[in-house]
């Protein structure tokens, strides 16, 4: 097994393997040894490039968060650029929802990593929520509230919970799909199921906007 610390590609290879394993197994069930074995490096070399397991996990979650933030920020810019009419705002908000769903489907490792945390994986690393998840949700909720207020929509909506609802459902559908009456699992690669889910998510969002204060 190689242990050359000067391999310029080692860090990226380690992070890629760690991302896959943390997403598949979770933090607690993934060892540094398993990550090293996945890329043909020993534990000492893994530690040289990325540190111990907590540091490696933070690096993985930071990369996932930055990818998520980039997609969300771009979608928020488009949402903010919409006209003030209720019709335009509704359409722009649904486009925002679609953009986030597309991100989740294009980067399934990101929802998988967060869902592992929802199952209390790596709970001692609380800075993942305080530095990444919490601020991003708050930023999105504030931006959406501003756009809704401008259009006179959603006065009775709990926007923070609406954002969480979009996240919960998009992540869960992307990872698990739905189960039909025969017990067959239908996921996002089944286009009729994806279209059905998208229409349902749109209906949930517009239903919240139409709720009376």
Image (cartoon, rainbow, N blue to C red):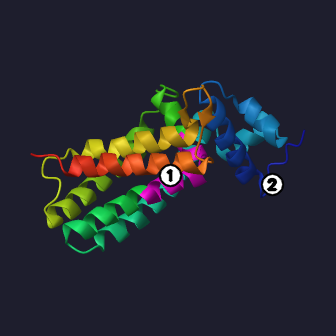
Main SS of the magenta segment? Answer: helix
Q: Residue furthest left?
A: 213
Mark 1 Cα shell of 10 Å, populated few (<14), some (14-19), many (≥20) = few
Which of 184/3 is in front?
A: 184
Q: Is residue 142 left or right of residue 13?
A: left
Q: Tell me which residue sits at (26%, 66%) in the image.
A: 89
The mark found on residue 11 in the picture is none
Query: Is residue 105 a member of the stretch shown in magenta?
Result: yes
Residue 131 in view in this figure: no
Of marks 1 and 2, the one in the foreground: 1
**Which secondary structure lies at badge 1?**
helix
Where in the figure is residue 172, as x and y percent of width and height? 49, 37
For label 2, the residue is: 6
Which of 61/147 is in front?
A: 147
The quarter of the displayed image where residue 1 is located: top right
Residue contact between numbered discs 1 and 2, judged by CB atoms under 8 Å = no
Q: State which region is magenta.
A: 98-111
Where in the figure is residue 24, as x and y percent of width and height? 65, 34
For marks 1 and 2 on the same chain, the one whose residue lies earlier in the sequence: 2
For label 1, the residue is: 195
């Amino acid at each position: 097994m190689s242990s050359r610390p000067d391999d310029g590609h080692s860090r990226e290879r380690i992070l890629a393997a760690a991302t896959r394993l943390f997403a598949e197994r979770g933090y607690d069930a993934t060892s540094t040894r398993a990550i090293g074995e996945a890329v043909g490096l020993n534990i000492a070399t893994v530690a040289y490039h990325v540190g111990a397991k907590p540091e490696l996990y933070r690096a993985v979650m930071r990369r996932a968060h930055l990818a998520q933030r980039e997609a969300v920020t771009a979608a928020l810019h488009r949402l903010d650029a919409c006209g003030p009419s209720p019709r335009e705002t509704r359409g722009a908000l649904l486009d925002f929802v679609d953009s986030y769903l597309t991100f989740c489907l294009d980067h399934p490792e990101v929802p998988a990593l967060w869902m592992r945390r929802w199952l209390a994986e790596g709970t001692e690393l609380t800075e993942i929520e305080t530095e990444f998840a919490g601020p991003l949700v708050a930023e999105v909720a504030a931006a959406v509230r501003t756009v809704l207020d401008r259009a006179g929509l959603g006065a009775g909506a709990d926007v923070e919970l609406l954002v969480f609802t979009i996240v919960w459902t998009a992540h869960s559908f992307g990872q698990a799909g739905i189960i039909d009456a025969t017990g067959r699992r239908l996921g996002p690669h089944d286009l009729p199921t994806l279209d059905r889910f998208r229409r349902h998510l749109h209906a949930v969002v517009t239903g919240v906007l139409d709720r009376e204060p």
